[in-house]
């Protein structure tokens, strides 16, 4: 008997060491039940059991529920045994005691043995076993070996929960990383689309037959963007960069600068606003259509203008006005000449009428 006991003890200790050294990959386990079944099997090799059950704490309020048991036919009896321990107020003693607590069964003859499942951090639950033999007839070291096995089981349960939380955290992190990567990819696509749109817009602006200009709304109207047509219009090479220069530098006189700024301060869009601009040593007339562009969440940030050189049109209009004036002058002279001629005709007719009246009378 002593030899058998020693052999069982040795096998149990080897099994416990093996469980620590060759631990199941807890990180990949989906359920804690294999841990409970393994612990029960090793206890059964020390203390032959007619049945057993694990009651695990499900929440912080120390509510215990039947998590694993065998055989299945004894589920009701095992639950009644647990309820009886609760009614007798023995649960606190079981949870606080580091060694098995034997007690008489309430559902039939024989004994039961209860043991806590606890780690230094908290109570995980408790184990109830129904030995096939009387508890006092079991080998002396059986209780100690069962305690070792259940301590290792409680540690494995805690590790499983930590791995589970770690896996959930990793899954959430992977989801967040995936979302961030998708967002970065989408942002990259948007940036590429924006760059392509800006290139297309710039190409369109550069190839416009009329001038284009963006200026800031500071006092001196700094130029932010121009196209080649405007550069040529202002007497520069088409590739000349005007960005950063004050737009008012190209307005010939201070009076014209004041009038233009007063027009801008009114806040209305510029519609066919005609003014003069310096073009090298010369001055040209331009027609400006402009609109203030708002900055998101703020007031107007810049003024966008389409500028057309109307110098020749204005010269033609001035020539036409001059021709109209000359025509009016010529018409006035001709009208006076006709009026004088009419006076002479009327005078001659009057003289003739008087002569004929005198002749026939």
Image (tube, rainbow, N blue to C red):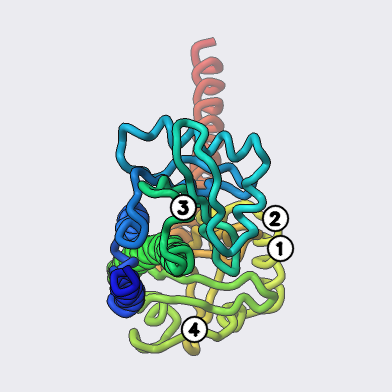
Q: Are marks 2 and 1 in contact (CB under 8 Å)?
A: yes
The label shown at residue 95 is none
Q: Is residue 169 visible?
A: no
Left or right: 314 in relation to 101: left
Q: Earlier in the sequence, mark 2 or mark 4?
A: 4
Between label 2 and label 3, give the one nearer the viewer: 3
Q: Are marks 3 and 4 in contact (CB under 8 Å)?
A: no
Q: Label 3 vs label 4: CA separation?
A: 97 Å
Q: Is residue 253 above or below residue 87?
A: below
Left or right: 38 in relation to 164: left
For image coordinates 55% across by 45% down, the residue present is 103
Q: Earlier in the sequence, mark 4 or mark 1?
A: 4
Q: Label 4 vs label 1: CA separation?
A: 23 Å
Q: Residues within 10 Å of mark 1 (few under 14, many from 20)?
A: few
The label shown at residue 266 is 2
Total count of labels: 4
Q: Earlier in the sequence, mark 1 or mark 3?
A: 3
The residue where tag 4 is placed is 243
Measuring from the top left, give residue 64's x and y in whole percent.
Answer: 54, 43
Q: Is residue 33 visible?
A: yes
Left or right: 92 in relation to 278: right
Between label 1 and label 3, give the one nearer the viewer: 3
């Amino acid at each position: 008997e002593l030899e058998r006991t020693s052999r069982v003890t040795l096998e149990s200790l080897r099994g416990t060491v093996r469980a620590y050294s060759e631990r199941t990959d807890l990180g990949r386990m989906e359920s804690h039940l294999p841990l409970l079944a393994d612990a029960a099997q090793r206890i059964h090799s020390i203390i032959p059991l007619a049945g057993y059950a694990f009651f695990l704490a499900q929440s912080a309020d120390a509510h215990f529920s039947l998590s694993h048991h065998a055989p299945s036919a004894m589920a009701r009896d095992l639950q009644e045994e647990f309820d009886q321990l609760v009614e007798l107020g023995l649960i606190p003693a079981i949870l606080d005691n580091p060694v098995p607590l034997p007690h008489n069964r309430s559902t039939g003859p024989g004994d039961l043995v209860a043991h806590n499942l606890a780690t230094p951090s908290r109570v995980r639950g408790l184990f109830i076993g129904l030995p096939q033999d009387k508890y006092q007839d079991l080998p002396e070291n059986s209780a100690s070996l069962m305690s070792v096995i259940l301590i290792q089981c409680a540690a494995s349960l805690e590790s499983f929960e930590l791995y589970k939380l770690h896996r959930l955290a990793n899954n959430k992190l992977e989801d967040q990383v995936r979302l961030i990567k998708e967002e970065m990819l989408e942002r990259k696509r948007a940036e590429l689309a924006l760059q392509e749109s800006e290139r297309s817009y710039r190409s369109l602006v550069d190839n416009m037959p009329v001038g284009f200009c963006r200026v800031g709304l500071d006092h001196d109207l700094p130029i932010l963007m121009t196209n080649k047509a405007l550069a040529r219009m202002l007497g520069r090479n088409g590739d000349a960069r005007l960005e950063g220069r004050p737009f008012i530098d190209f307005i010939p006189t201070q009076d014209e600068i004041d009038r233009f700024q007063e027009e801008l301060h009114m806040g209305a869009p510029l519609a066919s606003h005609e003014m003069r601009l310096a073009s090298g040593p010369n001055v040209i007339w331009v027609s400006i259509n402009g609109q203030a562009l708002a900055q998101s969440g703020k007031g107007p940030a810049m003024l966008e203008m389409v500028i057309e050189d109307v110098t020749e049109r204005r010269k033609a209009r001035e020539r036409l006005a001059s021709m109209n004036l000359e025509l009016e002058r010529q018409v006035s002279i001709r009208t006076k000449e006709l009026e004088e001629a009419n006076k002479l005709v009327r005078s001659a007719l009057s003289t003739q009428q008087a002569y004929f009246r005198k002749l026939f009378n």
